[in-house]
Image: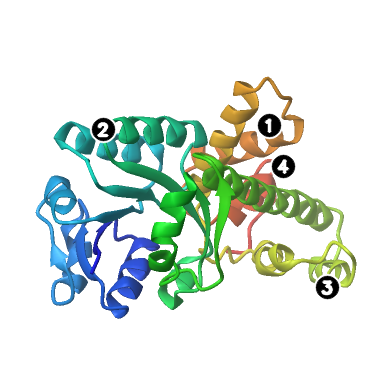
Amino acid sequence: MTKIGMVGLGRMGSGICRNLIKQRYSVTAYDINRELLKPFASYANIAENGRGLLDGSDVIFLSLPGSVQVEETVREWIAHGVKGKIIIDLSTSYPLSSKQLHEEVRAAGGRFADASLMGTPAHAEQGTLMVTFGGDKETFEDTRGIMSCFASRGVQYMGGPGSGNIAKLANNYLAIMYVALYSEIFPLAEKLGFDTLQLFETIGHSGVNCAMYQSNGPKIVDQTYEPSFSLDLALKDITYVKKLFEEYSMPSFVLDGGLNLLRLGQLKGYGDHDLSEMARVVREYPGMEEKN
């Protein structure tokens, strides 16, 4: 059977790894944080380092913070030797970086693809993620069955190298900007003396209603900011989107406002807090008091 490597056992990677193990794949796991490996010690092979994982695996999945870490890992492996290996980046990475790595790995005799994840850590645990795959069609066909172990909502072929990342970034851009809009309008309504809970419920019966509105609006109205997706990760993703606009000389009027709001939130120390705390930044600007 195909031997699987899993690098990165954070909130997404741990659930993915568990689902691969459930499907009786031989899994070798590695994370620079050794504490994250302990729950897998009885169920997976634990690699001492990234090279050891590479040597013992046929198909390797990466679940890392972003392109900086992916580039560092993959280029170290290229220097070591990747002939015959398939490396699939599950991270939300910069598409042009993924295209470059695809070429470098191919030149070294291996295969590389970007396969971004749609969903939350809960979906990763349940195996109900969706994957947007970018790379050559042969690699897609060869690995689709493995990815279906953790992506029961579908493994979608989006096109050539970088396409999986582009699909994910487009999705995240829209989602993040929705939250930015909610983060501005509800504090304004509050400043005007509105009952924001009633306003939220009224708008929820209009065409504006959607899953993002229902999951993030209450956090902003109630000022609870329940953790789901960090402001730091949102800023990283939006920065990647901004780079794409700049790379292709496209204007990004709306994006720039959201980017500035995210940057201000990070400067205020909210980077590891939930994305919805953009509303806290908006409230603090005119001196409004938070409930909590």
Q: Comparing marks 3 and 4, which lies closer to the viewer?
A: 3
Task: Please state which of residues 172 and 198 is positioned toward the viewer in this rendering.
Answer: 172
Type of residue at label 3? Glu
Q: Residue flagged by tag 2: what amino acid is it?
A: Ala
Number of other residues with Cα within 10 Å of mark 4, as a class: few under 14, some 14 to 19, many 20 or more: few
111 or 235: which is nearer to us?
A: 111
Instruction: Give the residue type at disc 4.
Output: Pro
Q: Residues within 10 Å of mark 1 (few under 14, many from 20)?
A: some
Mark toward the start of the polypeptide (3 vs 2):
2
Asked if residue 2 is positioned above or below residue 105 in the image, the reply reads below
- Give the labeled residue for mark 3: 201
Tell me which numbered mark, 4 or 2, is placed earlier along the sequence: 2
Label 3 to label 2, Cα distance in Å? Answer: 57 Å
Tags 3 and 2 in contact by the CB under 8 Å rule?
Answer: no
Mark 2 closeness class: few <14, some 14–19, many ≥20 residues within 10 Å: some
Label 1 vs 4, first from the N-terminus: 1
Q: Name the residue at 11% across, 50% down.
A: 52
Horizontal arrangement in the rendering, residue 281 relative to residue 266 (left or right):
right
How crowded is the residue under tag 3: few (<14 C-alpha within 10 Å), some, or many (20+)? Answer: some
- What residue is at 45 percent from the left and 69 percent from the top? 148
Q: Which mark is residue 256?
A: 1
- The percent position of residue 281, horizontal first and vertical second, equals 62, 45
Residue at 25% x, 64% y is 2
Cα–Cα gap, marks 1 and 4: 21 Å
**In percent of the image, x 9 and y 54: which residue is there?**
48
User: In front: mark 2 or mark 1?
Assistant: 2
Identify the residue position indicated by label 2 in the image.
108
- Structural distance between the alpha carbons of marks 2 and 1: 39 Å
Q: Earlier in the sequence, mark 3 or mark 1?
A: 3
Q: CA distance from mark 3 to mark 1?
A: 29 Å
